[in-house]
Image: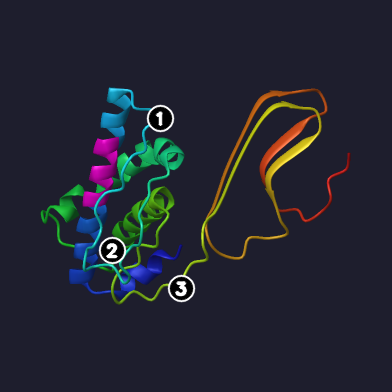
Amino acid sequence: MDPLSLSTIGAETLTMGIQFLYAQAGELLKRWRERREGGDAGQALPAPEAGSAVLRNEPQGLTVDDAALERLAPEIRELRASLAEYAEGIEKVAPDNTGLVQVTDALRAALECVLGEDLTFQGEERPAHDPDVGVEVTVDDVAGYVAGIRANQLVDGRLRVDVKAKRVLPGGRVVGADFTGEPEEP
């Protein structure tokens, strides 16, 4: 992600964007907590409402990646807390505040990962992203080589890889993503 793209939009749009991300993060965290407390581990978590006029494109079919939310919830909580005074209008938003722009972009990136949707703001110069690539591999025993994804390079987009192995036997190797481009020796 390029946080500098956020510094090119006006203070008003950035303020609305921060408020939008702050609210979305709050809804996700509430629903995540409720789900964990209620023990609904098998029930899908609904996505928060979108439709904010601050986004360049209206999100289509938001879904929540439960594994990504579980993994990113602590980071989302911390980033959201860092934006509280700006989201609530206590502190003034300035697009030239590099720290603020970086935190905003980091929260947006985390939410994009969880929601699987582009959250580019109105007027922001940000390239369109390639679709997400999501890979999930679950194996019992690994005696050889297991990779969630293997490619020469990742040009653009987001990659989510989840590899689970119960046991890795001597000589076995498990990797999430392998970008060496070289064939694995047996």
Q: Residue at 17% across / 70% down in the picture?
A: 12
The rendered magenta stretch, by its main secondary structure, is classed as helix
The amino acid pointed to by label 2 is Asn
Classed neighbour count for the residue bearing mark 3: other residues with Cα under 10 Å, few (<14), some (14–19), many (≥20)? few
Disc on the earlier residue, 1 or 3: 1
Mark 2 and mark 3: Cα distance apart in space = 22 Å
| Residue for badge 3 | 127
Assess whether residue 29 is covered by the magenta stretch.
yes
Which quadrant holds residue 21? Answer: bottom left
| Residue for badge 2 | 97
91 sits to left or right of 24: left
Q: Is residue 125 above or below residue 136?
A: below
Q: Position of residue 91 (x, y in %)?
A: 14, 56
Under tag 2, what secondary structure? loop
Classed neighbour count for the residue bearing mark 2: other residues with Cα under 10 Å, few (<14), some (14–19), many (≥20)? few
Q: Position of residue 181 (x, y in %)?
A: 78, 56
Q: Which residues are magenta?
A: 23-31
Q: Which of the pair 3/51 is nearer the observer? A: 51
Mark 1 and mark 2: Cα distance apart in space = 42 Å
| Residue for badge 1 | 42
Q: Which of the pair 97/74 is nearer the observer? A: 74
Under tag 1, what secondary structure? loop
Mark 1 or 3: the one toward you: 1
Classed neighbour count for the residue bearing mark 1: other residues with Cα under 10 Å, few (<14), some (14–19), many (≥20)? few
Whether residue 81 is visible to the viewer of this picture, yes or no, is: no
Q: Is residue 165 above or below residue 161?
A: above
- Mark number displayed over residue 136: none
